[in-house]
């Protein structure tokens, strides 16, 4: 045997091991505002948990040296997922035991070792899925199984003593509201972005002379920094609400959801327009010529030929837009639009890292979920196409 | 069936098709030949209104095409092109059914038509549910041909449909096309730059040069009486005689009862191929088979040049 068969997996296990050896797995602080004292993994968790983590880590490292058969890759996925769940379990266990006898203000936060090792385990799963060339359905099942198990652990109160969950417990009601608001902002922006962007994209595809003008305007919009964009919209929207009272009555104001949605729409236009145009323009001219020659009307050509053939490219644009809007909507909290960004900015104001994470982690999760769902859709839409 | 009267097409003041008039009779196979830029493809696309006329008139089946809505006109004219243009997201079956679906035929009739057409163009039933990228180039063009024939159009327009194929597939499909023409009796307008293909397939040849019709006649006509140096070059000065021989079968020059030595040849063999056989066999005569497998007579070298 000459060297590892799967250097990626080996690298990930080594990185996780180094992080666990060198940094704290959890941090223990007397209150939520001071930075904690790091506690290493072997001091934080019970013997059996530690033994299981070590055994799984060694097994994954060993798997990197074996022939990467489909069965081994499947076992790698199960092993890495198991490791991820064990790390979460260990963190919950550590927080629960540290909470015994401590003051109510004391906090147990997640340390670098936890984050790095968890990230490595997640990457090992993704790498193995890619090597397996797994079908979307399998990927969906792996993702749902991991989320389900984490949900079961959370439902049993395992994480209740962790600082991020303590922050959540205080804000349970407002968290649900802001999460819903965040999603509402994103969808509220996506619908008009598609409604405006698709016709613009079609115009760019049909009238090449208009193309340059449309794209330079949209490119310019894209270069405006997001904080500036939200700020710049305050004045014109306030003026609009004053001069057209009907708009003011339905909630158009200089601050709040209106500037947020407008800004998100403006940022979303370029990807929507560009991918609509590319999708339509990429259809083989011979296909269009025969479609006309067969006697299809322009409307039939659009619905039966151009739309289905351009759909995967269009959906790829929509994927970019969704992920981008989910991230940008965090900044919208600055203009009073609410959403998960409000936790981030509250946390920044109070220097409470766990409160920032309470806003940031669900945002990342939302973005990953949207990305995953759109990739699934694109794969389905692109099936049976010529390569 | 197809009638062009003083047809002109201008692009930005330049005449691409310059006062072209000709008539293709019902069931005729008319081939438009010319070099690139001669206006042959444009002439073809004028017929189904893919390209609008500048002046002149075109009648299809006695009806002025300007009086028919373009979509309705195109649905009764079959259309096949060099790059085939199959719809990549539709199965073979769905591709063939394009025009019948546009015409809202009942499903059962469409299914039956697709089955018949696949048999006509010799596509195996197993390809029915495949997608275009799973087929070879020759099979794709067979699908394109079946699609063009699907709604039983009175006229077929074909723009270099064999142009992208390798020589062997090309030859095979040209033979298929001749067979399909004989079987269906369709009126066909066919564009090619290949004079040999034109002479082999055509009942009547239209030669275009710089947008003008320089000669319109049967293949024999064109070989025997080329109109000017351009046509003479196009048919190949030195080879024109051999091409003429290629137009007739051995049976036309058969001497019944004459006995010759050697393996008898098929009476459908062209005179050109018979000459090649004589050269290979170092003989000045060949025995010709009859339908029962016996010998009907002979063909003589002297008769070839008669």
Image (cartoon, coloured by chain):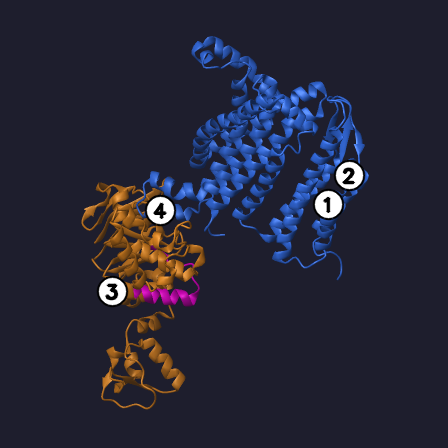
Chain colours: A blue, B orange
In reply to whether residue A134 is colored magenta, the answer given is no
Q: CA distance from mark 4 to mark 2?
A: 66 Å
Indicate the quadrant where residue B193 lies: bottom left
Q: Secondary structure at mark 2?
A: helix
Check contact, mark 4 vs mark 3: CB within 8 A: no
Label at residue A53: 1
Q: Which structural element holds mark 4?
A: helix
Vertical arrangement, residue A274 with respect to residue B111, above or below: above
Image quarter (top left, top right, bottom left or bottom right) of the N terminus of chain A: bottom right
**Which disc, if any, is residue A41?**
2
Residue identifier under label 3: B183
Q: Which residues are magenta?
A: B158-178
| Helix, strand or loop for disc 3 | helix
**Placement of B277 over or under A99, stated as above or below:** below
Callout 2: residue from which chain? A
Check whether the beta carbons of the residues at disc 3 and disc 2 lie within 8 A of each other. no
Q: CA distance from mark 1 to mark 4?
A: 61 Å
Q: Are marks 1 and 2 in contact (CB under 8 Å)?
A: yes
Q: In percent of the image, x 65 and y 43: which residue is there?
A: A122
The dot on residue A291 is: 4
Crowd tier of the residue under label 4, counting other residues whose Cα lies within 10 Å: few below 14, some 14–19, many 20 or above = many
- Chain of the residue under the numbered disc 3 shown in the image: B
């Amino acid at each position: 045997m000459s060297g590892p068969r799967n250097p990626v997996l080996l690298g990930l296990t080594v990185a996780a091991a180094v992080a666990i050896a060198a940094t704290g797995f959890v941090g223990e602080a007397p209150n939520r505002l001071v930075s904690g004292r790091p506690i290493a993994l072997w001091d934080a968790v019970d013997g059996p948990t530690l033994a299981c983590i070590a055994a799984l880590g060694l097994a994954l490292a060993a798997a990197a040296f074996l022939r990467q058969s489909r069965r081994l890759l499947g076992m790698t996925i199960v092993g890495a997922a198991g490791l991820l769940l064990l790390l979460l379990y260990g963190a919950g266990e550590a927080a629960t035991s540290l909470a015994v006898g401590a003051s109510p203000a004391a906090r147990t936060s997640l340390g670098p070792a936890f984050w790095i090792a968890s990230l490595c385990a997640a990457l090992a799963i993704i790498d193995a899925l890619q090597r397996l060339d797994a079908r979307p359905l399998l990927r969906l099942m792996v993702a749902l199984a991991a989320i389900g198990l984490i949900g079961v652990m959370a439902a049993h109160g395992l994480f209740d003593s962790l600082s991020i969950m303590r922050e959540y417990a205080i804000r349970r009601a407002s968290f649900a509201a802001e999460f819903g608001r965040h999603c509402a902002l994103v969808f509220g922006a996506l619908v008009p972005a598609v409604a405006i962007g698709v016709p613009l994209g079609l115009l760019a595809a049909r009238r090449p002379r208009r193309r340059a003008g449309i794209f330079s305007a949209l490119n310019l919009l894209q270069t405006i920094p997001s904080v500036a964009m939200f700020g710049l919209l305050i004045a014109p929207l306030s003026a609009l609400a004053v001069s057209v009272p009907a708009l003011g009555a339905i909630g158009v104001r200089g601050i709040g959801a209106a500037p947020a949605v407008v800004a998100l729409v403006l940022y979303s236009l370029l990807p929507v327009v560009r991918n609509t145009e590319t999708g339509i323009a990429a259809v083989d001219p011979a296909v269009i010529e025969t479609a006309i020659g067969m006697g299809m009307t322009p409307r039939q050509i659009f619905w039966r030929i151009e739309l289905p053939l351009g759909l995967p490219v269009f959906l790829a644009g929509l994927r970019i837009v969704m992920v981008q809007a989910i991230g940008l909507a965090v900044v919208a909290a600055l203009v009073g639009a609410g959403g998960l960004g409000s936790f981030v900015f509250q946390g920044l104001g109070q220097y409470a890292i766990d409160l920032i994470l309470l806003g940031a982690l669900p945002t990342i999760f939302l973005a990953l979920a949207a990305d995953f769902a759109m990739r699934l859709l694109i794969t389905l839409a692109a099936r049976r196409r010529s390569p | 069936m197809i009638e062009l009267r003083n047809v002109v097409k201008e692009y930005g003041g330049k005449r691409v098709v310059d006062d072209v008039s000709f008539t293709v009779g019902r069931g005729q196979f008319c081939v438009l030949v010319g070099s690139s830029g001669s206006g042959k493809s444009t002439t073809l696309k004028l017929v189904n209104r893919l390209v609008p006329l500048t002046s002149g008139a075109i009648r299809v089946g006695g009806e002025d095409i300007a009086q028919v809505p373009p979509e309705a006109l195109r649905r009764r004219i079959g259309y096949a092109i060099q790059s085939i243009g199959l719809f990549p997201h539709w199965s073979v079956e769905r591709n063939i059914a394009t025009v019948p679906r546009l015409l809202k035929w009942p499903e059962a009739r469409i299914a039956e038509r697709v089955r018949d057409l696949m048999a006509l163009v010799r596509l195996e039933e197993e390809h029915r549910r495949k997608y275009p990228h799973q087929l070879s180039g020759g099979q794709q063009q067979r699908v394109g041909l079946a699609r063009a024939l699907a709604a039983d159009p009175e006229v077929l327009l074909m723009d270099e449909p064999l142009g992208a194929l390798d020589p062997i597939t090309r030859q095979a499909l040209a033979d298929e096309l001749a067979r399909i023409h004989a079987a269906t009796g369709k009126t066909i307008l066919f564009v090619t730059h290949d004079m040999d293909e034109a002479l082999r397939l055509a009942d009547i040849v239209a030669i275009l040069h710089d947008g003008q019709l320089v000669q319109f006649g049967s293949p024999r006509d064109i070989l025997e009486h080329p109109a000017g140096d351009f046509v003479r070059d196009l048919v190949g000065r030195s080879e024109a005689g051999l091409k003429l021989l290629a137009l007739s079968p051995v049976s036309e020059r058969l001497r019944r009862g004459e006995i010759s030595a050697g393996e008898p040849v098929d009476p459908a063999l062209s005179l050109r191929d018979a000459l090649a056989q004589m050269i290979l066999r170092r003989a000045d005569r060949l025995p010709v088979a009859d339908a029962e497998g016996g010998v009907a007579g002979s063909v003589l070298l002297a008769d070839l040049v008669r």
